[in-house]
Image (cartoon, grey):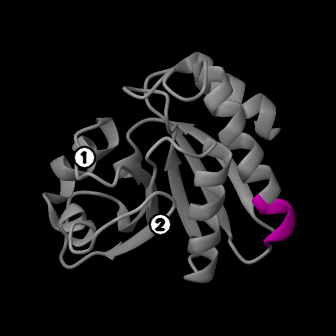
Amino acid sequence: MTHVEVLSGDITQVSAEALITAINSEGMWFGGIDGAIRRCAGGVFHSQAALNPLSDGETVFAPSERKHGGSFESVLFVVDDLRRPLCDIVAIALQEAERLRLSSVTLPTIRTGVMAGIYEPTVRAALDEMATAILQFVATSPQMRQISVVVYNDETSMQHLKKVLQVS
């Protein structure tokens, strides 16, 4: 059974086999999570994502090539050009993590920072989309051991996710 938790803090310091995050297909990777990954690991993960042309809904698995300052081992990028519901983007990423046989992943709150309000009308709507994908995945995928959703500096979002994901 998959354990789901909602944590507050720096996602790069949460132990996991992979940190899952969204990127766009145009290589404009300067958002909050991209910056956090670069601060602890330099460009090692993003350079792997840049090797091939990317399109909406694709995933890129970037394993660690060296030690870095984070507590995650690899990054699983999912390309999000804001053409699909967030539920689909999160589902694609979790399904790829399962295919890769990852046992623990972390997810930031996607589309709640610089992308807030562009596709989903509110941050709460984006959180609900994420939660729907996570709950559907957990109901059908017993292989993954741990999914940690990490919220940075937003108590309201953290409490909302805990409520909809039914975790304490």
Distance CA(mark 1)–CA(mark 2): 16 Å
Is residue 165 visible in the rendered image? The answer is yes
Identify the residue at the far left of this view.
42
User: Is disc 1 surrounded by few (<14), some (14 to 19) or many (20+) residues within 10 Å?
Assistant: some
The residue depicted at 24 percent of the width and 46 percent of the height is 29
Is residue 15 visible in the rendered image? The answer is no
Q: Earlier in the sequence, mark 1 or mark 2?
A: 1
- Could you say which is closer to the camera, residue 140 or residue 17? 140
Which amino acid type is marked by label 2?
A: Glu
The residue labelled by disc 2 is 58
Left/right placement of residue 68 relative to residue 138 reads left
The residue depicted at 52 percent of the width and 50 percent of the height is 107
Residue extent of the magenta highlight = 137-141
Where 132 sits versus 89, above or below? Answer: above
The residue labelled by disc 1 is 29
Q: Quadrant of the N terminus?
A: bottom right
The residue depicted at 54 percent of the width and 62 percent of the height is 105
Identify the residue at the far right of this view.
139
Which amino acid type is marked by label 1?
A: Trp
- Could you say which is closer to the camera, residue 143 or residue 15? 143
Left/right placement of residue 142 relative to residue 95 reads right
Q: Which mark is drawn over residue 130? A: none
Prevailing secondary structure of the magenta residues: helix
Res 113 → quadrant: top left
Q: Percent position (x, y) of residue 96?
A: 57, 73
Left/right placement of residue 84 relative to residue 22 reads right
Task: Assign a secondary structure to mark 2.
Answer: loop
Where 24 sits versus 151, above or below? Answer: below
Left/right placement of residue 140 relative to residue 147 reads right
Task: Assign a secondary structure to mark 1.
Answer: loop
